[in-house]
Every structure is written in structure tokens, then in C-alpha cells.
Amino acid sequence: MLATATQPVGRVVLRDISWDFYQSLLGEIGDAPGTRITYDNGLLQIMVISAAHDNPNRTLASIVEIVAEETETDVCHLGSTTIQRPDLLKGFEPDSCFYFTNADSVRNKNALELPRDPAPQLVIEVDVTASSLNRFSIFAAVGVAELWHYADDKAEIYVLKNGEYEKAANSLFLPVLTPGALTEFTNSYRRKMWPVWTRELREWVRTQ
């Protein structure tokens, strides 16, 4: 077992880790707040989430829920629930994940069992610093249809095509949203009171 630690972002990467060890680790610390555990065929990353990471994640998640409500789109928010594919030796905890057209199939579940259950349709990924693991490839392998990536104060939308992510001009599931709109509302949240920010977001959606 080889471990490398990266500071100050609170990230540790372990190599040559078995799936059983990963499962044991999830049982010990998987529900600890502020951590993300990622596994990819022997590589295991443990990351401690900072406020700089979690604030834009929560803002983007709020955008999903508000826009879904305004557009009368069904949505199920499963937060950072653990997503696993034992057959692919891959597992991750997203910053946030959502279901739309198949929301009913997961809404009442206490745990997901992929591939019997569907993969999340939208995952939010915030990068404060570069990750040691290529989580994009893990999301793609599991079958996440849409990915919102936020880094350096900018949001991008990616959609899965032929097993790879391509930049998109609009969200698949909330088409009113563009990368520019996501960037604007995510960044403006820092400067405005919640009632003002939510009102402006709702009014913007209604004009589209």
C-alpha cells in the first residue's frame, strides 16, 4: 500500500487498495460529514471538503431545485450518497447528484444498487484544486448523463456522448440553464442576501 498526502486541501491517495478495504473504509467513515471517498480500480482517494469547495456546490444544488420547481420538473436530490459499481471496481461520493426522469425509481430508496438501480442523471463536481483521480472518467463509466463542473469561478456543462463528456450549451434536464447562467448565479450568491438571490433567479427563469 502506497499513500501520498497533498496539503493544504486535505487529500490522501492510497494505491493498490482492494475493493474489500474500500468497503470497510466506507463502513467506518463513509457517513462522516465533509469527506468524499473515491475508488477507481485500486486507487482510493479521501478528500476533506472545505467551505471554499462546499459553498459553490450548495449554491449549484439550490439552482437545480429552484429551477426545477419553476419549470415544474420532477427532481430527486440524493446529495453526496455513495455511488458504487462493484462490477467495474468504481465508486464515488458526488458533491451533489440528482435524478429527473427516473426520480420515482430512487425517491424511496435508502441505498442504491447499481447497475440494478439507475445512475444519477446529473452530478455536480466542484474543483478547488486539481484532483489526484480523474473523476470524469469514473462518472462516465458509471453512466452519469450530465455533469456540471465548477472551477476558477466558472461553471461548465458536460453531457455524456459515446462514453465521453462533451461541453454543452444547455443542460439536458433543465434546458433553460446555460454555463453562463450557472456561472452568473453561482458567483452572485456571494454578494446577495438569500431572499434577493432566489427572487432574481426565479424571475430570470420566468423570462426565459
Image (cartoon, rainbow, N blue to C red):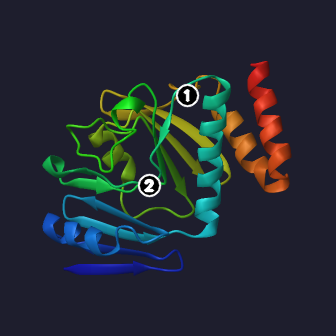
- Residue shown at 30% from the left, 32% from the top: 163
63 horizontally vs 27: left or right: right
Q: Nearer the viewer, mark 2 or mark 1?
A: 2
Is 80 drawn above or below residue 30 in the view shown?
above
The three-letter amino acid code for the residue at tag 1 is Ser
Residue 76: x and y in percent read 47, 38
Question: Along the line of sight, which residue is nearer the eye, 176 or 68?
Answer: 68
What residue is pinned by disc 2?
80
Quarter the C terminus occupies? top right
- Label 2 neighbourhood size at 10 Å, few (<14), some (14-19), many (20+)? many
What residue is pinned by disc 1?
171
- Residue shown at 24% from the left, 53% from the top: 90
Residue 138: x and y in percent read 31, 48
So how many labels did they put on this image?
2
The three-letter amino acid code for the residue at tag 2 is Ser
Is 159 drawn above or below residue 31 in the view shown?
above
Q: If you read the primary sequence from the N terminus, does the residue marked by circle 2 or circle 1 appear first?
A: 2
Q: Quadrant of residue 92?
A: bottom left
